[in-house]
Amino acid sequence: MTGHNLSSQTRLDWLRLARTPGVGPVIFAKLIECFRSPEAALDALPRLARRGGRHAPQTPPSRAQAEDELADIERFGARLVCSCETGFPVALATLDPPPPVVTLKGPLTPEPQPVCAIVGSRNASAAGLRFTEDLARGLGKHSVLIASGLARGIDGAAHAASLSTGTIAVLAGGLSNVYPPEHAALYQAIAEQGLLVSEASLDYIPQARDFPRRNRLISGLSQGIVVVEAAERSGSLITARYGAEQGREVMAAPGSPLDPRARGANALLRDGATLVQSVDDVLAVLEGVPRPALMELNPPGFETEPDCEYQQTDTLDETVPEIRESLIALLSSTPVSRDELARRLHTPARAVLTALVELELAGRCELRPNGMVCAVHPDPGAEIPTS
């Protein structure tokens, strides 16, 4: 759903829900689907978290805090856009689920030009950097925007080479937090000529878990992803995996089998990624890829009834404790698909998702955007329910 105008109060509550601890994109989307408005979802949060086993309060930001955040963003020269509003990047709106909000800074608009991500090693070789610069510059001459993550190495080279033709930097932290610090001048140039994107609050300092979320947005904005010099356990491979899950084209530049920096990219090629060695190779792939199209959905607060277990009869409520505890018994630190959990429990997938929403709000599991779920260490305020 996109292109709708929210009232000022609903917009504040949308932001409050998005900034509530424990409410990630999956939980946010499910709550909006169920309760049809952020106001109703905020009201339901304490009850849902208690049902999942949380006893300590879960406090969303106040409306005054949300107002302060919006004012800070405006003073910073940026703009916050909710996923249902006009101006939200269409490619991100097609993700399942989209980020609830993004903060944008810069004059560039991702539509209607094609976007290609270029990602790779932080400790890139001179040859890898040269290839990246030539590729980014050449794609820019063909009106292709370049997306990357502002990291050292390949990311920075891709951004610098595409400044004049259009570059998009997705940050793991807030827009006012320049990371790495040595890219401060590049960051400022992108803010003036390109586009900076973040789903975090303005001054948020990124942690390790935030970089995969950033990588999901890099691939989500793009029609294709080119990986250059990625090691075997590289964040660039996470970007490529997200791209494949999102239906984007995954490409890789081949490298020497003797160079550890090439092993990840070579593994992608072995597994079916498209081999690219020139601008023409990438253009040939992108020409056959349609831009992500958005299916128009009903806006929150209008017309259709929610398809949600929370609003159904009490029959499911009576069985939810059993579902929750059975789910916890099946979960581990290794992610498993929600469909697999439903199959194991012989329980409808919707009911399983309902119980998982409550468990994540209680801090007992993590729902990931790719349909996977894993256990987490219990929240200090959470207790295992006895009924």
Image: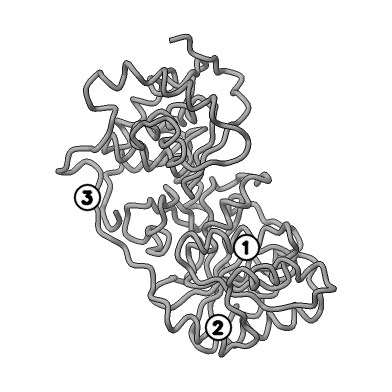
Secondary structure, mark 2, is helix
Q: Which is nearer the N-term, disc 3 or disc 1?
A: 1
**Residue extending farthest left:** 303
The answer to whether marks 3 and 1 mark residues whose Cβ atoms lie closer than 8 Å is no
Q: Which is nearer the N-term, disc 1 or disc 2?
A: 1
Residue ID for mark 3: 298
Residue type highlighted by circle 1: Gly
Residue type highlighted by circle 3: Asn
Residue 258 left/right relative to 156: right
Residue 286 left/right relative to 351: right
Residue type highlighted by circle 2: Val
Residue 248 left/right relative to 263: left
The label shown at residue 282 is 2
Relative to residue 150, is residue 7 depicted above or below? above
- In this orientation, which residue lies closer to the viewer: 264 or 111? 264
Spot occupied by residue 254 in the image (x, y as percentages of width and height) = 70, 78
Relative to residue 168, is residue 44 depicted above or below? above
Q: Which is nearer the N-term, disc 2 or disc 3?
A: 2
Which quadrant is the C terminus positioned in? top left
Which quadrant is the N terminus positioned in? bottom left
